[in-house]
Image (cartoon, grey):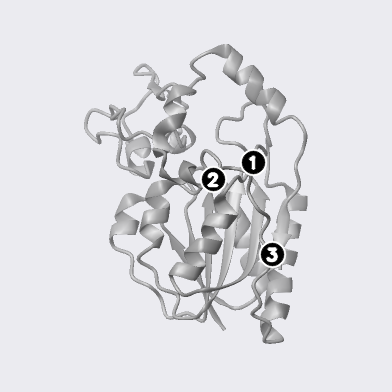
Amino acid sequence: MKAEIIYFSATGTTRKIVKAISQGLDCNTHFTDITLEKNRKTYHPSDSDLIVIATPIYGERIPRFIYDFLTQIQGGSRPLIALSVYGNIGFGISLKQFEDYAAKNHFRLIAAGAFIGQHTYASEEVPVAYGRPDIVDLKQAAEFGRKIREKINTNDFISPDIPKSTLPKFITRLPDALTRFLIRQPVLDALICNACQACSNSCPVGAINSASLQIDEQKCIRCYACVKACPKSARVAKFRFRIFGQIFKIIGKKRKENQMFL
């Protein structure tokens, strides 16, 4: 069996989870990283029997630009595994989006999962899902992959029951950059920066000018890829108001567990 795993991972958490799931699937796997804009523009489907799609969830939904990219991929009745990765707050309407996507693009959705990854805006002061996925999470992801393989081996392609979302469907049409009202644009400390361009090279939406290293406010989606990529920690982003961080900490305090649907 050949599998193609298509994933978006601005800060690396989604990548860790799909790697663990691939171990459980134990098949010939092709990884397609669509994090960078150039990779999405040059994407060509691989010859595969199974498709896995994984993305972080922003604002309780699949990022609009990622969903728009995915619409070009046709299933041809192939089985699909859909994975939402979220920061311990909520996966919202994302799994229902995947369910609709599978129907429209002629996939057979055979499994879905909502996995926890360290929240994009987590820090030592606001430790929401800090350090996740941890060892337990990755073991669960690998076991999920093994169970999916067992399901396929028994020719069971029945779609799982996806939990209903209480969120209205219109949120899928909201702009990806709504988080700019909560988080300030990552600021560059020129005294620390060595102009290595790691930040501009890692930006998923091409929002950072490679020469000036300035960020286009209209493009920036506050994904923190530039903050995580900087080897000098010269990029810093903060909540617009301190109270936002405190609210965020309270909402995400209780540890949530991964949910898997077969």
Looking at numbered disc 2 in the image, what kind of residue is underneath it? Ile
Q: On screen, 36 above or below 218?
A: below
- Using the numbered discs, state the Cα–Cα distance from disc 2 to disc 3 in whole angstroms: 20 Å
- Residue 154 at x, y percent in the picture: 72, 86
Residue extending farthest top: 242
**In the displayed structure, would residue 96 be above or below residue 205?**
below
Against 94, residue 132 (above or below) is above
Instruction: Using residue 140 as the reference point, say whether residue 6 is left or right of it.
Output: left
| Label 2 packing within 10 angstroms: few (<14), some (14-19), many (20+) | many
Task: Provide the secondary structure element on which disc 3 rests.
Answer: loop
Q: Earlier in the sequence, mark 3 or mark 1?
A: 1
Spatial distance from mark 2 to mark 1, Cα to Cα? 8 Å
- Going by the numbered disc 1, the residue's amino acid type is Gly
Mark 3–mark 1 contact, CB under 8 Å? no
Where in the figure is residue 261, as x and y percent of width and height?
70, 63
Q: Residues within 10 Å of mark 3 (few under 14, many from 20)?
A: few
Q: Quadrant of the N terminus?
A: bottom right
Which dot marks residue 90? 1
* Picture quarter with the C terminus: bottom right
Q: Which residue matches tag 2?
A: 57
Q: Amino acid at mark 3?
A: Asp
Q: Is residue 7 toward the left or the right of residue 252 in the image? A: left
- The residue that appears at 65% across and 20% down in the rendered structure is 247
In-image side of 121 versus 67 (left or right):
right
Judging from the image, what secondary structure is the residue with disc 2 in? loop
Give the mark, 2 or 3, whose residue is nearer the N terminus. 2
